[in-house]
Image (tube, rainbow, N blue to C red):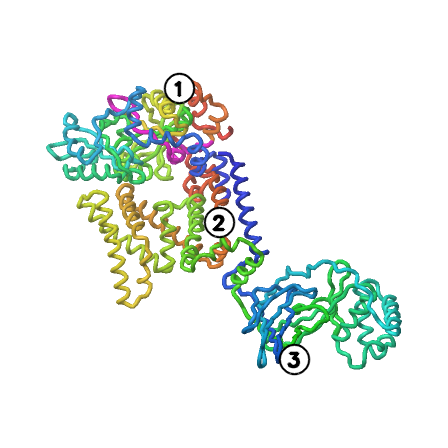
């Protein structure tokens, strides 16, 4: 057991306690949390800063507003409903088609208006928010995911998670939905996580849970070796999210839209640690490299250059 | 942020907590274990006399300086008499007075005595005694005896024991026979020794006391010779010639006087009696703190009404339960519903006991979940739905109580304290996790909560621990210190070792991908 402990230390693996105690509490001032915990605020900030996000169709903030949903989505056949304070994708409904008062989700379920209203009122009452506080639901553009990932994802939208440490992207992965994850890009529900080489934007082998998988379990295509398009743009967006929020340790979730390119979905002030398993690399080592050598005050382009140089896969054991 | 700050703070808290704790254990004698009992003795002096026609004054010497023992309580029983206590040269005295008395009178003095090794004869060093006034033959005999004994001794202690040895051989020693008749008692010899020691310029006095025996009944006063060697008082038994204060010897009064004097009545007939008792150590400590003038008792939980004390004996254990949870969450990495929900469940287990409590918890939560899933189909709003779930939980508990009463199972009745609101919230949270993240995650967290609650229950149920915390609430400062230190623990959690197994150097070799297409 102590061997394992030492092994993890040697690999520079970041644990929850260290993440919370040494990074989140040090670099993420609590007063800035609302900027990322409230997806509506994040979206508005990003729009101001010119960072691409899915277009906002409307906001449902009260029980009364629920009836306005048909008006909001009148001209949109496809849209996504997101509780502004939801975490880990809880409460998100993606509607891919509509006929009359029936809605078809991306997963193929048919929902009637009643069900949707119930879901919305639950969301507004805080069922999906941390601590059950009142919430609002965002109605936004449904991302049409780029065909690139079509072969290695099962329904749903694969998204790219980049950990940004004080403006420097330090690690990235793509989350690929599976049948087991019911089309959600959530690793703990069984989605595949695959690391991405920061320097080149090329995917590595994936993991499900802690098991290494080389091929997507549902589509059976190889996961590794895929070149993520617009990689520099993605890194650029991620790096700029630091200036956007002022939070020093964040996870930036980006999706690739077929037509619009990379869009920021949400930011996370307490990004999970599974990204280390997906990359089979410890985060701590990279964070330490940043703390030793990075110039955090430099403009985004230089910070990205730094990341590409330092974090070319695999990052060697010697620091 | 600043680790040193935290170390200093927790060190200060630890020292403060331990300091108070040690003070209370060593100085105030607070018991470390529950149900601990202290040996105490009831001592009693009964003074009987026939009063004369005029005013009566009865004087009784009462304990004051009692090396090895301390007085817990004392009282005087004397109907109609005026009472005063005062300090006399030989110790303390109680004086009863009455203008007119008729018939035989009995006065009682009673005291509670407990062993207290910290008590020593702490009176000041006495002055050199004046040489005794003796007639010429006696003076010559005394000087001869002193010269002889001095020759055979080295210091005060050996001088005294040598002197006592000479005295005990009364009839064979020409000097001694001047003073002592054949058949002299040990107390006569001790009294003589004080005179002779005064002649040798050594302060000495008689100490009268009783042996605190375990069997109850009257006891005879016995005498010890107290001799001051310039630093401390030494004790000699004139009968056995042994030096040292016997372990059971309780010094009642000192000097040549009798224990009681009566003015205006027949000579006193004094009976001393002892009875051994056991008293709750906590009571002894309380009284003792009172006597020492310590304020600690005024601000202790023991000053609260008993019902409130009972509540606090439970409440004070909650931080301990929280500490268990802290450990299991931050060092082991167990997932639970809600941060401190398991503590409340653990509290409920106190009423139901562990196994039955777990059964009840599982039954109620499972039934609640079933109903919650049904309610989901009715599409209720959140707060009304919670209200329904809560009401159903209460009804379920009532139902279980009635059913188990019918079946004659006792523990079912004791679920009243089960935290219904917490359980309702747990059901709600669990059903959401169930739907959003799948059954396995929900069950995992549910089982985690139960395991943590059980662990907290077991630790909070350690009798010795709850006694310690209740008697020494300052120990909770140590809990704070531990939590502060744990707050800066940034190492891995036990379960993370398994989670990140793939990242271990050995685990990596198998996983190093073919697809390193870089």
| Disc nearer the start of the sequence (3/2) | 3
Image quadrant of residue B60?
bottom right
User: What kind of element bears circle 1?
Assistant: helix
- The magenta span reads A257-284
Q: Nearer the viewer, mark 3 or mark 2?
A: 3
Q: Do tags 1 and 3 sit on the same chain?
A: no
Q: Nearer the viewer, mark 1 or mark 2?
A: 2
Q: Which residue is mark 2?
A: B476
Closer to the camera, B420 or A314? B420
| Direction left: furthest residue | A100
Closer to the camera, B138 or B461? B138
Closer to the camera, A159 or B515? A159
The residue under the point 45% across, 51% down is B320
The chain ID associated with circle 2 is: B
Assign the C terminus of chain B to one quadrant of the image.
top left
Q: Which residue is mark 3?
A: B266
Question: Which numbered dot is residue B167?
Answer: none
Q: Nearer the viewer, mark 1 or mark 3?
A: 3
Percent across and percent down for residue A44 are 28, 24
Q: Is residue A80 positioned above or below B110 on the image?
A: above
Q: Which residue is mark 1?
A: A300
Specify few, some or many for label 1: CA neighbours under 10 Å numbering under 14, 14-19, or 20 or more.
many
User: What kind of element bears circle 3?
Assistant: loop
Closer to the camera, B419 or A176? B419
Q: CA distance from mark 1 to mark 3?
A: 111 Å
Q: CA distance from mark 1 to mark 2?
A: 50 Å
The chain ID associated with circle 3 is: B
């Amino acid at each position: 057991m102590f061997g394992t402990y030492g092994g993890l230390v040697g690999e520079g693996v970041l644990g929850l306690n260290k993440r919370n105690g040494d990074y989140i509490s040090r670099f993420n001032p609590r007063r800035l949390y609302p900027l990322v915990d409230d997806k509506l605020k994040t979206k508005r900030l990003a729009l101001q800063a010119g960072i691409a996000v899915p277009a906002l169709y409307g906001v449902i903030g009260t029980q009364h507003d629920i009836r306005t949903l048909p008006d909001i989505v009148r001209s949109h056949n496809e849209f996504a409903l997101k509780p502004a304070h939801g975490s880990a994708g809880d409460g998100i409904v993606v509607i891919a088609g509509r006929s009359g008062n029936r809605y078809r989700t991306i997963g193929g379920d048919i929902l009637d208006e009643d069900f949707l209203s119930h879901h919305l009122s639950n969301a507004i009452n805080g069922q999906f928010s941390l601590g059950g506080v009142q919430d609002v639901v965002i109605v936004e553009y449904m991302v049409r995911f780029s065909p690139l990932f079509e072969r290695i994802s099962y329904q749903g939208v694969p998204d790219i998670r980049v950990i940004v440490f004080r403006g420097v992207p330090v690690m990235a992965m793509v989350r690929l939905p599976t049948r087991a994850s019911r089309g959600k890009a959530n690793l703990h529900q069984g989605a595949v996580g695959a690391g991405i080489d920061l320097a080149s934007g090329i995917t590595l082998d994936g993991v499900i849970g802690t098991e290494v998988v080389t091929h997507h379990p549902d589509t059976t295509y190889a996961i590794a070796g895929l070149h993520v398009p617009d990689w520099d743009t993605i890194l650029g967006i991620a790096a700029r999210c630091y200036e956007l929020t002022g939070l020093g340790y964040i996870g930036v979730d980006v999706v690739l839209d077929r037509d619009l390119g990379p869009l920021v979905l949400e930011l996370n002030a307490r990004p999970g640690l599974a990204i280390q398993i997906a990359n089979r690399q410890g985060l701590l080592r990279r964070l330490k490299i940043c703390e030793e050598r990075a110039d955090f005050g430099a403009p985004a382009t230089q910070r990205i250059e730094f990341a590409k140089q330092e974090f070319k896969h695999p990052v060697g054991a010697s620091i | 942020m600043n680790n040193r700050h935290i170390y200093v703070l927790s060190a200060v808290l630890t020292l403060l907590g331990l300091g108070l704790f040690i003070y209370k254990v060593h100085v105030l004698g607070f018991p470390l274990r529950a149900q601990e009992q202290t040996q105490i003795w009831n001592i009693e002096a009964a003074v009987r006399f026939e009063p004369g026609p005029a005013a009566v004054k009865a004087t009784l010497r009462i304990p004051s300086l009692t090396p090895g023992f301390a007085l817990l309580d004392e009282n005087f029983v004397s109907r109609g008499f005026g009472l005063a206590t005062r300090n006399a040269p030989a110790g303390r005295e109680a004086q009863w007075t009455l203008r007119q008395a008729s018939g035989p009178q009995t006065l009682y003095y009673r005291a509670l005595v407990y062993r207290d090794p910290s008590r020593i004869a702490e009176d000041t060093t006495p002055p050199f005694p004046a040489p005794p006034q003796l007639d010429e033959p006696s003076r010559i005999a005394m000087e001869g005896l002193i010269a002889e004994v001095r020759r055979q001794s080295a210091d005060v202690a050996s001088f005294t024991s040598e002197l006592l040895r000479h005295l005990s051989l009364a009839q064979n020693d020409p000097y001694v026979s001047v003073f002592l008749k054949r058949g002299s008692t040990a107390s006569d010899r001790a009294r003589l020794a004080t005179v002779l020691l005064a002649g040798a310029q050594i302060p000495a006095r008689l100490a009268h006391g009783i042996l605190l025996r375990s069997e109850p009944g009257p006891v005879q006063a016995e005498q010890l010779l107290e001799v001051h060697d310039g630093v401390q008082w030494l004790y000699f038994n004139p009968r056995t010639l042994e030096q040292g204060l016997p372990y059971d010897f309780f010094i009642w009064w000192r000097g040549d006087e009798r224990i009681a004097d009566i003015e205006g009545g027949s000579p006193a007939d004094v009976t001393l009696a002892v009875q051994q008792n056991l008293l709750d150590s906590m009571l002894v400590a309380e009284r003792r703190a009172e006597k020492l003038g310590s304020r600690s008792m005024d601000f202790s939980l023991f000053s609260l009404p008993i019902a409130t004390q009972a509540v606090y004996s439970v409440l004070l254990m909650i931080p301990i339960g929280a500490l268990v949870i802290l450990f299991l969450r931050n060092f082991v990495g167990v997932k639970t519903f809600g941060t401190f929900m398991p503590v409340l469940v653990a509290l409920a287990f106190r009423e139901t006991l562990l196994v039955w409590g777990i059964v009840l918890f599982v039954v109620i939560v499972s039934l609640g979940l079933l109903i919650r899933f049904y309610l989901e189909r009715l599409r209720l709003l959140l707060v009304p739905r919670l209200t329904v779930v809560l009401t159903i939980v209460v009804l379920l508990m009532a139902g279980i109580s009635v059913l188990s009463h019918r079946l004659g199972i006792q523990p079912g009745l004791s679920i009243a304290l089960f935290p219904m609101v917490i359980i309702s919230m747990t059901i709600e949270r669990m059903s959401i996790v169930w739907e959003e993240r799948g059954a396995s995650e929900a069950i995992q967290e549910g089982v985690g909560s139960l395991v943590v609650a059980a662990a907290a229950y077991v630790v909070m149920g350690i009798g010795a621990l709850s006694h310690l915390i209740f008697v020494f609430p300052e120990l909770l400062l140590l809990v704070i210190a531990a939590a502060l230190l744990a707050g800066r623990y940034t190492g891995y959690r036990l379960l993370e070792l398994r989670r990140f197994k793939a990242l271990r150097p050995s685990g990596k070799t198998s996983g190093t991908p073919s697809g390193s297409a870089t």
